[in-house]
Every structure is written in structure tokens, then in C-alpha cells.
Amino acid sequence: MANEEQFDGVLLGLAQQITQAQGPGIDPLLNTFLGFLRRKTDFFTGANPEQVEAAMLKSVRLQLSIAEKEKAEKEKARKKQAEKKAAESAKKKESAPVKAKTADGRDTGVEIEILNDEDQVENEPKANSNTKEVKQKQKPAKKEEGNDEDDEDEEDKDLLKPNAGNGGDMDNYTWTQTLNEVSVQVSVPAGIKARDLVVDIAKSKLKVGLKNQTPILAGDLHANVKVDECTWTLEDAPDGRCVGIYLHKSQGTTWWPCVVKGEPEINTKKVEPENSKLSDLDGETRQTVEKMMYDQRQKAMGLPTADEEQKQNVLKKFMEQHPEMDFSQAKFT
């Protein structure tokens, strides 16, 4: 079981070819594999039907048992993580600073934090017990809308904007990526067969092209890949044919600026995961991702994040509930 993933690349390529030839679904894949056993081995003829069925059920039950165990472990880890986040969130709320507003709700541009006696700075004289201590932080100037280009780092000005798939559109190929995989689509003339191609995928190198011709794409990969989990296909395209290359990153959770070193690079700071993938996440993770995306949009417009909005609301309610409090006597540090 320790090496059960070593054939994933081969099986993935096989599954893709079967899907193209016989259509989607698990039945074509299972029938193809069982047909291989029937034609090339004595699996069906060397034993009686009961033994064949028992062998199949044994394998199915083994995989079901493993799947259930993995599901239970993931659920346990998810609950543990949720409890940890809840505890951290509760702790942050207890000491979180809030933004002060005027009585009519206008933002004063001041962020305050109510301090307890034990939170006072060492050697600092204590304030009167009827006086609340606050810390002041000046609100940053609001960023003017439409100035994203001006704020872009000088070193990023020559980088390309990522396409919809978080990759790049080049003259002879297009590529997209997720945190774990890279897909490259290389255009080739109509009528090209697999035997006419040169596709070499190594740990740190890639070469794609037609035999006896200059490679279309070749060089050192941006980062290493897991060769056993990489594959390629040849498919029909509207303007000819297309070589599809699927690379599995050795170092996951990273964005590549290019497929091959020396090729034009994209600005990975502008990569945005597809919103459509949110439906695949569990409820808690989805809320976290949606909050991050909301905060990112708010910051780009110079507006407060979700947490900052919450702090403003807390302070507003605090002031409404305590109209007797005189903030003019507050101590600013």
C-alpha cells in the first residue's frame, strides 16, 4: 500500500484515453481492465465463478475500508481545526482594537483599544479608575480607485497578466495551473500522429515538438515535477491538433510564473483561484476563502475588511450603550 500512487500517472493517462474512446463514466474503465484480465490472463478461466467473485469483492471491500478510514480521519482533522480557529477567534475578539466613530456614525480615523490595568506599560503611572485607556492608530489614507497600475512594483511591470486559468497565453502554446498541477496545450498541424511527436518529460526538463524539427517548447522547468504522475495526450482542435501535457508539481501549493525558464512570465501576485471551485469545499473552508476574497477586494478599494467593519460596529454599539463615557479624558499612547 505504501507505493499505491506510483502508477497514478500511467492510470490517469489510460483513463483519459478510455474516456476519449468510449465516453465518460467508470464502467468503460472497469470493463477495459477486466477485459484485459480475460484476454491476457487466466483470472476468469483458472478458477470457478465463486472464486473470481470472492477475489473481486475482497479488493472492493479493502478499498471501501480504506476510504471510510480516510474520510473519518479527515473529518476528525476538520473538527479539530474548527475548534482551534474558534478558540483563536474568541481570544482575538477579547483584545481586538476597535475604530472610533462620532455620534452620527462618521469614521474618526482613529483605532482604539480598551486596556485593563494589567495591560499598562511597565513604569507607566496608572490612570484614574474612572478613565479608560486607549491606544490610537491613525487610519491610513484611502487609496484612490483606479491607481492599481501606479502602485504596481517596478519589477512587476514587465510581467504578463495571468489568463483565466492562472497561466499564460503564448504564441505557440497556452498553459494553465492549479496549486498542484500545470496543464500545457501545444498547437500542432492537422494530421499529426503520436508517432510524429517528441514529448520528453523529465524531473526538471520538458521538450515538446515534431520529430526532426526545432522544438516548440523546450528547456528547464520552473520547478521539479513528479514524472510518474505526468502524462500527455494528442487531441483534435478547431484549427488542427493539440498536444495536452499534464504536469504534477513536486512542490504543491505554489504558483509558477512560467512553464519553462526563459519564457515570458506572468505576475503571480495577480493569480486568482476560480470562484467555481468554492462549491467543492466544505462549509467552514468555503467561508474562510470567501472572507479572504472579500477582504482582498475591500483593501484594493481602500475600504475596511470584514474584521475592521466588525470592530467599527462593536465600537458604535459600545458608544451608544455608554453615552456617559467621556472620550475627551481618554489617554492616548
Image (cartoon, rainbow, N blue to C red):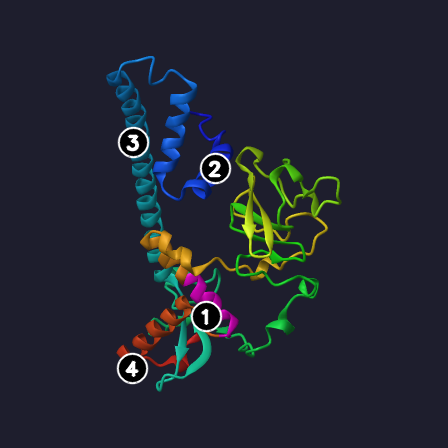
Packing grade of label 3 (10 A; few <14, some 14-19, many >=20) is: few
Give the CA distance from mark 2 to mark 4: 70 Å
Instruction: Name the mark on residue 64.
Output: 3
Q: Name the residue under label 2.
A: 12
1 or 4: tag closer to the N-terminus: 1
Within the magenta stretch, is there residue 189?
no
Give the number of the mark in front: 1 or 2: 2
Front-most of residues 16 and 196: 196
State the residue at coordinates (36%, 32%).
31
Q: Position of residue 175 (x, y in %)?
A: 59, 53
Task: Please name the predominant secondary structure of the magenta segment in the image.
Answer: helix
From what the image shows, is residue 196 above or below residue 300? above
Instruction: Name the mark on residue 135.
Output: 1
Q: Position of residue 276 (x, y in %)?
A: 41, 59
- From this viewpoint, which residue is outermost toward the front? 191
State the residue at coordinates (63%, 43%).
223
The magenta region covers: 291-302
